Amino acid sequence: MGKKVKKEVEPPPKDVFDPLLIESKTAATVVLMLSSPEEEVLAKACDAIYKFASKGDENKVTLLGLGAVERLYKLISHEDPIVRRNAIMVFGIMASNHDVKKLLRELDVTNALLSHLVPEEDVVIHEFATLCLAQMAVEYTTKVQIFEQGGLEPLIRLLDSPDPDVKKNSVECIYLLVQDFQSRAAVCELNVIPPLLELLKSEYPVIQLLALKTLEVISRDRGTRIILGENQGLDCLLKILETNEFNDLHVEALAVLGNCLEDVHAMQLIQQTGGLKKLLSFVGDSTVPDIQKNAAKAIAKAAYDSENRKILNEEEVENCLINLLEIDNDGVKVAASQAISAMCEDLSSKRAFGLQGIPQLVELLSSNNEEVKEAAVIALANLTTASPSNSSAVAEAEGIEPLVKTLNAQRDGAVANAAAVLTNMATQEPLRLSVQSHGAMSALTEPLRSTSSPVQSRAGLAVAALGCDADARAELRNAGGLGPLVDLLHSKNEEVRRNACWAVMVCASDELTAVELCRLGALDVLEEINLSTGRKNKFSEAALEKLLDNNLSQKYSQMGYLSSSNVITDGFYDYGQIKPGIKLLSLEELSMQELTDRRAIIFINAKPREDVLAVEEKPQNSSYEQTTLSPSVSRKSSREKSSLMVSPVEEKQEPPGRRSSFSKSSSKEKGLRKGKGKKEEEKMIDGTQIISKVQDEINQENAQWQPPPDFILLDYINDASKTILPLTTTREQVVALAQFVADKMGGAIERDKLHDFSWELHISEIEYELKSNVVPIGKVKKGTFYHRALLFKVIADRIGIGCSLVRGEYNRAWNEVKLVDDSPQGVTGLLLPPQEYIVDLMFEPGFLMKQGSAEADQYKRI
């Protein structure tokens, strides 16, 4: 045998580096290794970094600071599958950090990750690539990038992956993407419904939950709901609800069903299969607040369709909702109240709730939760709209007091709807009186001051509804509510402005409130509104007319017309025609002006003698200054004021003509006679009398101004009552009154001699005599058209003859009366419609001219 020779190991080539095992204990060293050209080094470095990053967020920040992300980004597209896989795994872990996500967006990593979602790639790459995308898709910009780069299609395809982690990450990413409407529309076209329904059968609850959440979002679109129904999605959802093991999925399943029930077809389908009854039964039996809340929300969504409301009513959904109102959870109460509001559109449901649900809703008005209070009052507003029986039910449930308190709630919606409920109740007089007795008008002053347009609008409407009673108007006036109401007339919101006009129209029904509204500027604002074609409305015109009806002097001066229902009372004065927007001075202000050459202001004050005497007996109301119209007299000293007092005895002894005279000479004579006596008495009065006299003078100066009584006019009215009122027919009364007026104003005048009738000189003499532009009509003995027409209207109103007063041009004015003509001969019992006539007071007093005739037109014009 030959000797065995030992084989020598060949030394490595000189150009080959001997393997070196390195143990690195710092992350920085490993990050440097990511730049190595060796695939094995890269793979091991990536694996080490993955383990390091998995330990906590601080390590991720450390790696970010070392520049690991930029190096890893180059490796996710490496040709070696292991290097590529390990690099993507690191990104999947690190993407949970906010700063890392920000850098990844800057690097546009989504495009590279999406390119690895192809079927050929490793499942691990799919898992961590989708994980990274899901974490980045929280940001809107990343959603846009994924959508624009076509990421939806590969993500939907991966829903069928055998790996549960890939499914979970993919469906989570899709859920985040479909929050944007563009992605919602796109996923339907990509047929996402079948794989999502398949995920509901998964053994992993988290996957089922994400699938349901995704279905809830995409089922908000009607097209998706149709596809869901076609793929038996409704049955699948109902099975989840019927399975107790899936109780953690019931809330989300109900949310999806709620969206589906918005479609009539889906609702009919569920009803036909008995699913709707099961659903309501499930809600009734459940004790989970979130399930109850979502069920109520589902019913509310469905109830917005009329056909759905009918179906729900057939299934007696009202009982379910009423029961939910009693659940001790605010969220459930809110959702149930909202569902009741929606169901109220169905009359049968409204009646059903009126019988059972109103007491529970009224009770919720006292809740400390403002959201609950708002939802309950909205439901009550819908229930009481056009439903007197439900309004009565609210009152029976003692709901008026909490409703009035709700007018001061924190939420605008609660305040507005509380006002709406009170408005609905006010349509019935007993309820309206009950609402008023709880101080509703005072409570409405704050809502009127609100800055919310809905609150302002509803508050104005409530004032209009409740203000038809004098006590309610007085309460609003005393509570300072008229000021905010007038302010609403300036609103730029059309509805607010309209309702404010309506409220002003109603409140102007009594003189006190109308005067206060005018003082606050309502008249000026309404005039401004009615001058605008875009802002005026029927209510603004009616409100202006109503205010003017309680201020006839302004109405006649501005509009030149008083209807038969506009009864002239004491204190009326004819200033002449004024332009819209010009403020008419009061009679007191006009009486204080110096005598001018403008036309005389004719005033009416036919107070009975007893009233005047009673006023004169009171020291604070007895000064002559209060009854004189001369500014020169009103500026006399206080001593002269007291010396010019007219005693009741002297007034009784004077004839009517003397009593109505306000000549300066007669006043002076009285003053001098009484003045002499006073000078003698002043020597004997003591200090106590002086103090008393000074106090009387202070009272006189502080007393309310009163126009002087016109006793001549009073005598005219008394004479007309005795001689004209007894006549049998209205026609005879009109003719007799026309002749009476003409006789007192200078008699009949020939038409061709009208220019010789010097009425202007006569009026000027009266003005000079009184040293005032303001003239009582009884002093006018030579009157033209407008004097006679005014006197005719005044006396006619006092004795009950209906007539209107119309101002023309060039000092013309006339009265219109409506008379019924006699039946034609041979026809008995025929009642003809009334005809309108113009009454001649100038040329042939008592002659009646048919409206529209040539003679009537000639009378009106020069």
Image (cartoon, helix red, strand yellow):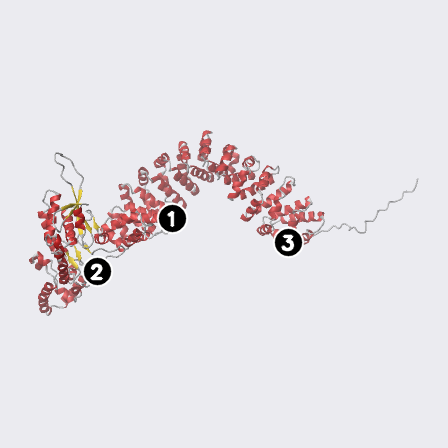
**Residue toward you, 519 or 646:** 519
Instruction: Identify the residue at horizontal 19%, vertical 55% (top origin).
Output: 810
Foreground: 582 or 56?
582
**Amino acid type for the residue under numbered disc 2:** Glu
Eye-nearest disc, 2 or 3? 2
Left or right of residue 156, residue 736 in this image = left
**Circle 2 — which element?**
helix
Which quadrant of the figure contains the N terminus?
Answer: top right
469 vs 621: above or below: above
Location of mark 3 (residue): 67
Decide: is 758 above or below 381.
below
Mark 3 surroundings: few (<14), some (14-19) or many (≥20) residues within 10 A: few
Q: Earlier in the sequence, mark 2 or mark 3?
A: 3
Q: Which of 784 and 279 lies nearest the eye of the viewer?
A: 784
The residue tagged 2 is 589
**Badge 2: residue crowd in 10 Å (few <14, some 14–19, many ≥20):** few
- Name the residue carrying label 1: 412
The picture places residue 369, in percent across and down from the top left corner, at 40, 46
Q: Amino acid at mark 1?
A: Asp
Q: Do the numbered discs 3 and 1 sit on residues whose CB atoms are within 8 Å?
A: no
In this view, the mark in front (2 or 1): 2
Can see residue 608?
no
Instruction: Give the crowd class for mark 1: few <14, some 14-19, many >=20 residues within 10 Å.
Output: many
* Tag shown at residue 60: none
